[in-house]
Amino acid sequence: MERMPSEEEVLLRMIAGDESAFSSIYRHYHPSLYIYLLRFCKVPSLAEDLVHDVFLKVWEIRERINPELSFSGYLYRIARNHVLKTINRIATDEQLREQLFRQLAVPEQPEQIVYEREYNRLFQEALSRLTTQRLNVFRLCRQEGKSYDEAAALLGISRNAVKKHMVLSMRFIQDYIYRHGDILVAIWLIKNLS
């Protein structure tokens, strides 16, 4: 890690909009944040993209940073949330997965075909374990692109019930894939999205 003058002083300058202070923070934390994110995703190019996303977020919300609190803790919490949100988005969006499979599918790389098949198998298994109502809500909202209000009207339930079913469905699918599959399957899918 690059040595930095008083971190609190640099943070105060960054909060005020000083781009050179932001660059100092970036250079200081980039190597360790990259290694941290690489542990989650195992794909170097994706880890690098995620690092850039995290620092972009830091710049955008810099005015909310409290320089008296641990900046590294704050930074790593943003990074962890971002990588998990990215994985979750891919794990529950069939159109996104299909788009990425088309982009990633190269005949000379048989492991990608294996990952695609394994992910599809796990995804279908997870769907088959949802209750009928959750499956109906998931299909309408995620696979057919209906809004919560439209799904509620079609199923004769409240918008809040649709939202609850979606949250529980997405959580279940994500957990199922994490428990039964290789996380690399989900990570490979987001490689070209950032």
Image: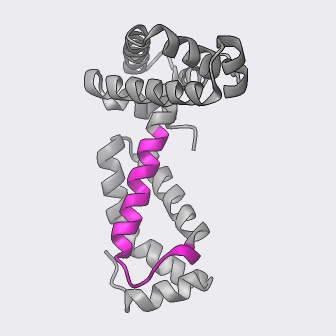
Identity of the residue furthest to the left in this view: 179
Q: How is the image coloured?
A: one colour
Q: Is residue 194 left or right of residue 128?
A: right
Residue 44 horizontal/vertical position (percent): 39, 46
Q: Position of residue 115 (x, y in %)?
A: 38, 19
Residue in the foreground of this view, choosing between 73 and 48: 73
The residue sitting at 69% across, 22% down in the picture is: 145
Overall secondary structure of the magenta stretch? helix
Q: Quadrant of residue 177?
A: top left
Residue 186 lies, in percent from the top left, at 41, 30
Q: Residue at x 66, y 27 (%)?
A: 148
Q: Viewed as shown, does residue 29 lie left or right of 146?
A: left
Q: Is residue 136 left or right of residue 44?
A: right
Where residue 90 sits in the image (x, y, percent)?
50, 31
Q: Where is residue 183, by image quadrant?
A: top left
When the figure is inspected, residue 91 is found, relative to residue 143, above or below; the finding is below
Q: Is residue 63 magenta?
A: yes
| Magenta-colored stretch includes residue 162 | no
Number of numbered callouts drawn? 0
Residue at 50% x, 16% y is 134
Identify the residue at image location x=36%, y=41%. 41
Which residue range is magenta in the image?
Answer: 62-86
State which quarter of the image contains the N terminus: bottom left
Please state which of residues 27 and 12 is positioned toward the viewer in this rendering. Answer: 12
Q: Which image quadrant: the C terminus?
A: top right
